[in-house]
């Protein structure tokens, strides 16, 4: 099959871009002809792309989806007609208002891939995303959610208006093999993501104040880039935590960071199904996470392979970080093993089979 993935910016450093390249690469490897159209251009992809996957940039800088709406729809339609594609995968339902009109009256399968969850207020009340999701519900052949919980949200919210097939396909572990090892772990807690409000690093820094008082030899290692970098660094300085918290840019050799971290912490206000949690588990890293919608509760079993914290409760987050640090070697080894074992449920080969099933259906 000839398949086009439409994404906002393939050059961004995030889970959406990571899993898109991963699925595209694997579908190409099993014989599909794969192309990715990135609305915003980039100098170089962050994640490795199979040489058989064709990449197209519509623009070569940041572009306003609203101001350039007609132009983007026209360019997308040109891509679809010229490529004679059999299927269009819309990476993030927020692009439906662009992709669905572009695909009007073309004989191709439309698959909308939700990367957050239905109730995530990604654009702070933006009607664009609201109407995009209605477009997805009415005019897609399939909507792919990352969790069963989000699938139920779509069915409940749209009811009889829902004309699309809803399927749950989780994100896969991005590494082919488990990297489980406890021998390289240091007194480090890792947290990776865009430095924005969604990821909640401000709350994690607040929580670390109590941790630093009791365990000043432990380091919180935050990795990412984004608009909130200056504010977060100022917050670290305000609480005199410069010796306890490291904030550094995304490192392509992210495996090094996983190998060295003893725990992983997720402080997001909302998610879809975080790739970072699956990757952390493949390294046998127990996770401490807010119970945000959606994803963490699908991956973490409280007290078994990590700790689930009431969403937004900073004091409780501090408590369970300290509880994790205080685990004895035996209990840590068991939790680490359980974490690694759980990641097997998200093996890339199994996830690609699910994608292939809806493509060829």
Image (tube, grey):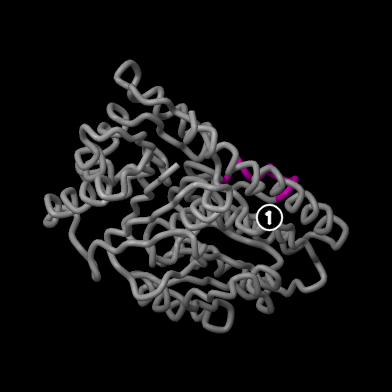
Q: Which residue is drawn at 52% across and 82% down?
A: 242
Relative to 11, residue 104 above or below: above
Instruction: Give how far across and how far down residue 5 sits, in percent.
Output: 38, 50
Relative to 194, residue 296 above or below: above
Task: Using the image as rendered, state which of residue 77 and residue 131 is in the foreground.
Answer: 77
- Looking at the rendering, the stretch of residues picked out in magenta corresponds to 296-305
Which quadrant of the figure contains the N terminus?
Answer: top left
Bin the neighbour count of mark 1 within 10 Å (Cα to Cα): few under 14, some 14-19, many 20 and up.
Answer: many
Q: Mark 1 points at which residue?
A: 281
Query: On the picture, is 296 further left or further right than 1?
Result: right
Residue 265 in view, yes or no: yes
Quarter of the view holding residue 221: bottom right
Q: Which residue is drawn at 69% across and 79% down?
A: 217
Relative to 104, residue 55 above or below: below
Residue 316 in view, yes or no: no
Task: Using the image as rendered, state which of residue 159 and residue 314 is in the foreground.
Answer: 159
Query: On the picture, is 19 further left or further right than 105?
Result: right
Instruction: Give how far across and how far down residue 174 sits, in percent.
Output: 60, 57
Instruction: Give how far across and how far down residue 259 sits, in percent.
Output: 70, 70
For residue 208: magenta? no
Residue pushed farthest bottom?
243
Task: Using the image as rendered, state which of residue 152 and residue 245 is in the foreground.
Answer: 152
For residue 299: magenta? yes
Residue pushed farthest top?
160
> What is the count of numbered marks?
1
Q: Residue at x 65, y 46 (%)?
A: 349
Secondary-structure class at tag 1 = helix
Q: Which residue is drawn at 27% across and 59% down?
A: 39
Instruction: Give how far across and how far down residue 272 sits, in percent.
Output: 47, 45
Q: Is the magenta stretch mostly helix, strand or loop?
A: loop
């Amino acid at each position: 099959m000839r398949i086009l993935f439409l994404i906002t910016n393939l050059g961004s450093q995030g889970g959406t871009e990571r899993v898109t390249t991963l699925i595209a690469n694997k579908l190409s490897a099993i014989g599909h002809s794969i192309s990715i159209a990135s609305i915003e251009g980039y100098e170089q992809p962050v994640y490795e792309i199979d040489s058989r996957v064709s990449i197209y940039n519509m623009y070569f800088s940041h572009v306003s989806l609203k101001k350039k709406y007609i132009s983007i729809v026209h360019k997308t339609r040109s891509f679809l007609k010229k490529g004679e594609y059999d299927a269009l995968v819309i990476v993030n339902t927020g692009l439906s208002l662009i992709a669905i009109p572009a695909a009007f009256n073309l004989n191709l399968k439309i698959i909308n891939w939700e990367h957050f969850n239905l109730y995530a207020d990604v654009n702070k009340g933006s009607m664009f995303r609201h109407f995009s999701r209605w477009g997805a519900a009415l005019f897609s052949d399939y909507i792919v959610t990352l969790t069963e919980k989000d699938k139920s949200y779509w069915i409940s919210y749209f009811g009889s208006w829902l004309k699309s097939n809803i399927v749950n396909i989780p994100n896969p572990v991005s590494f082919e093999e488990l990297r489980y090892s406890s021998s390289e772990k240091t007194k480090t807690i890792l947290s990776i993501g865009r430095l924005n409000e969604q990821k909640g690093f401000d709350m994690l820094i607040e929580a670390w104040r109590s941790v630093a008082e009791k365990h000043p030899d432990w380091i919180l290692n935050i990795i990412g880039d984004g608009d909130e970098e200056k504010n977060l660094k100022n917050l670290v300085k305000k609480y005199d935590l410069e010796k306890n918290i490291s904030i550094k840019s995304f490192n392509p050799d992210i495996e090094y960071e996983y190998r060295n971290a003893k725990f992983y912490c997720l402080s997001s206000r909302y998610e879809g199904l975080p790739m970072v949690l699956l990757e952390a588990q493949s390294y046998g890293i127990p996770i401490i996470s807010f119970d945000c919608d959606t994803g963490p509760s699908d991956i973490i079993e409280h007290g078994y392979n990590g700790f689930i914290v009431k969403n937004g409760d900073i004091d409780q987050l501090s408590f369970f970080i300290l509880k994790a640090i205080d685990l004895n070697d035996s209990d840590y080894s068991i939790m680490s093993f359980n974490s690694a074992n759980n990641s097997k449920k998200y093996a890339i080969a199994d996830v690609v089979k699910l994608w292939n099933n809806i493509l060829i259906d």
